């Protein structure tokens, strides 16, 4: 049956069902824990470094160790969700978050702390795969963009909440190394407080309906019918089930082998997902968040001002994501990505130019910027966050949830997400070395990747606005063949 005939027989729902919003929000709580877990260590790093007498190298590895778990968790989440379902993987992720929170807070030394952080990273990686896949599979096509963007909104809310929680705990205790509740150091409570949202996520996941596409794959048609009718508002459930089954018939069992193709070993659509993931990280967004305090101090702020500005940047990221949610299903993915790439190229280029005028303070390694370049760097950095937050931040998660055909979605998304975490780690780990060469060089390199992302989107990324997931089997790549 053609996609055009199925659309004419069953038009998308005209209004957004409150039930599908509710289950999408519940699924996106995994994104909240994703943001919280990856940011919470920033407030604890100085105190734990002192307590465990860590050098710079071991401190850096302790901070970045969770990212290694993220890549592994993302890689295996697709296989597990295909075998056991989307909901069980959410519950597993919640358990991993809970264990990591308690274990990190009670760590005896740096090596068991690293183990607990890797455990949390496994949960983050799994959540980064399963939430966008699940939301895409339950959301009506007309509203899939804004519902898919809830994942990024949850991530930035998690980042902000971690920053706020760390600040409140440290302020109440008189410092992150000071004693807090029950004679336990404040920095340990920063980790353990995550157990509360982790437990909430696990409980909510138990009450979510399973993905209708997973249920149809398992031939549980009655359950699938109920989910499609109650949550996605399908007017012709039987027709929708047949349409979904048609896309699943060619493969009885999904595995990573299904991703293999003739172009450099993978199908073109899989490479598209991988490149979207890589470009999202290679523009250097996490440098702004992981090293923001250092950046703001370089433009003349003292430590307290730098911390306040970092929090303000986090709030800006939340606002930017809300703007993206409002626009994505009206404007479309492709146009927004093009605008974002252009804006990031200019803003990063201005940052590179500004830091070319940096001056090294006498007797130190710190770089300061003279006027007006300190102002230019400040405005450009915040512009970069806004351009990223309204486009590449949320839209990559939306696209990863929807561009892959039904039969390879979970596995392909797992590979793309694993590539994203590997790129995140690479950018974060190499920034100190690049900054030693020169901040102008570092931001110039990120600007070059932003420019490449513009070319990539223009030539290869198709528009998926209003398209049913079952139509993705016929998705064509390349600018000349794009259709709205």
Image: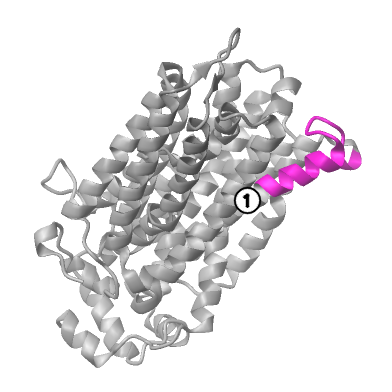
Answer whether residue 181 is magenta in the image: yes
Q: Is residue 92 visible?
A: no
At horizontal 20% and vertical 47% (from top left) the residue drawn is 455
335 vs 74, nearest the viewer: 335
User: In the figure, 112 relative to 365: above or below?
Assistant: below
Answer whether residue 439 is magenta in the image: no
Which image quarter holds the N terminus?
bottom left
Q: Name the residue at the front extreme.
A: 372
Label 1 belongs to which residue? 160
**Picture coordinates of residue 11, whole percent (x, y):** 29, 88
At horizontal 69% and vertical 31% (from top left) the residue drawn is 303
At horizontal 57% and vertical 14% (from top left) the residue drawn is 361
Q: Which residues are magenta?
A: 163-182
Q: Name the residue at the right extreme.
A: 182
450 vs 166, nearest the viewer: 450
Q: Quadrant of residue 187?
A: top right
**Picture coordinates of residue 194, whole percent (x, y):** 69, 49
Q: Quadrant of residue 250?
A: bottom left
Label 1 Cα crowd, 10 Å radius (few <14 / some 14-19 / many 20+): many
């Amino acid at each position: 049956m053609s996609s055009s005939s199925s659309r004419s027989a069953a038009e998308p729902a005209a209004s957004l069902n409150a039930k599908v919003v509710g289950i999408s929000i519940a699924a996106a709580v995994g994104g909240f824990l994703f943001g919280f877990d990856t940011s919470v260590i920033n407030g604890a790093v100085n105190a734990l470094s002192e307590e465990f007498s860590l050098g710079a190298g071991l401190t850096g590895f302790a901070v970045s160790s969770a990212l290694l778990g993220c890549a592994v968790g993302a890689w295996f989440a697709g296989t597990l969700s295909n075998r056991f379902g989307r909901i069980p993987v959410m519950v597993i992720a919640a358990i991993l978050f809970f264990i990591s929170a308690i274990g990190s807070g009670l760590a005896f030394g740096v090596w068991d702390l690293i183990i607990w952080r890797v455990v949390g990273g496994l949960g983050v990686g799994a959540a980064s795969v399963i939430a966008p896949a699940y939301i895409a599979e339950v959301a009506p096509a007309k509203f899939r963009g804004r519902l898919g963007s809830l994942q990024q909104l949850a991530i930035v809310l998690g980042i902000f909440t971690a920053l706020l929680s760390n600040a409140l705990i440290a302020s109440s205790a008189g410092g992150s190394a000071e004693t807090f509740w029950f004679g336990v150091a404040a920095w340990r409570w920063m980790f353990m407080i995550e157990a509360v949202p982790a437990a909430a996520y696990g409980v909510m996941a138990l009450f979510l309906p399973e993905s209708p596409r997973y249920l149809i794959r398992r031939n549980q048609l009655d359950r699938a019918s109920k989910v499609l009718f109650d949550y996605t508002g399908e007017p012709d459930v039987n027709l929708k089930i047949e349409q979904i089954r048609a896309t699943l018939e060619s493969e009885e069992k999904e595995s990573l082998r299904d991703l293999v193709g003739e172009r450099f070993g993978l199908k073109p659509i899989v490479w598209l997902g991988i490149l979207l993931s890589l470009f999202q990280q290679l523009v250097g967004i996490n440098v702004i968040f992981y090293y923001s305090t250092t950046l703001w101090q370089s433009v003349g702020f003292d430590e307290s001002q730098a911390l306040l500005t970092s929090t303000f940047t986090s709030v800006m990221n939340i606002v930017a994501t809300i703007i993206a949610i409002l626009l994505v299903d009206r404007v479309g993915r492709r146009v927004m990505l093009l605008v974002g790439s252009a804006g990031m190229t200019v803003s990063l280029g201005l940052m590179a130019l500004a830091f070319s005028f940096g001056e090294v303070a006498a007797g130190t390694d710190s770089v300061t910027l003279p006027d007006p370049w300190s102002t230019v760097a400040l405005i450009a950095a915040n512009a970069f966050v806004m351009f990223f937050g309204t486009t590449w931040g949320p839209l990559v998660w939306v696209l990863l949830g929807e561009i892959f055909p039904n039969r390879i979605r979970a596995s392909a998304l797992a590979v793309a997400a694993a590539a994203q975490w590997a790129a995140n780690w690479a950018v974060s780990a190499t920034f100190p070395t690049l900054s030693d060469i020169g901040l102008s060089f570092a931001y110039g390199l990120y600007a070059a990747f932003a420019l490449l992302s513009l070319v990539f989107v223009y030539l290869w990324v198709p528009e998926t606005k209003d398209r049913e997931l079952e139509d993705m089997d016929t998705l064509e790549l390349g600018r000349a063949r794009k259709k709205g």
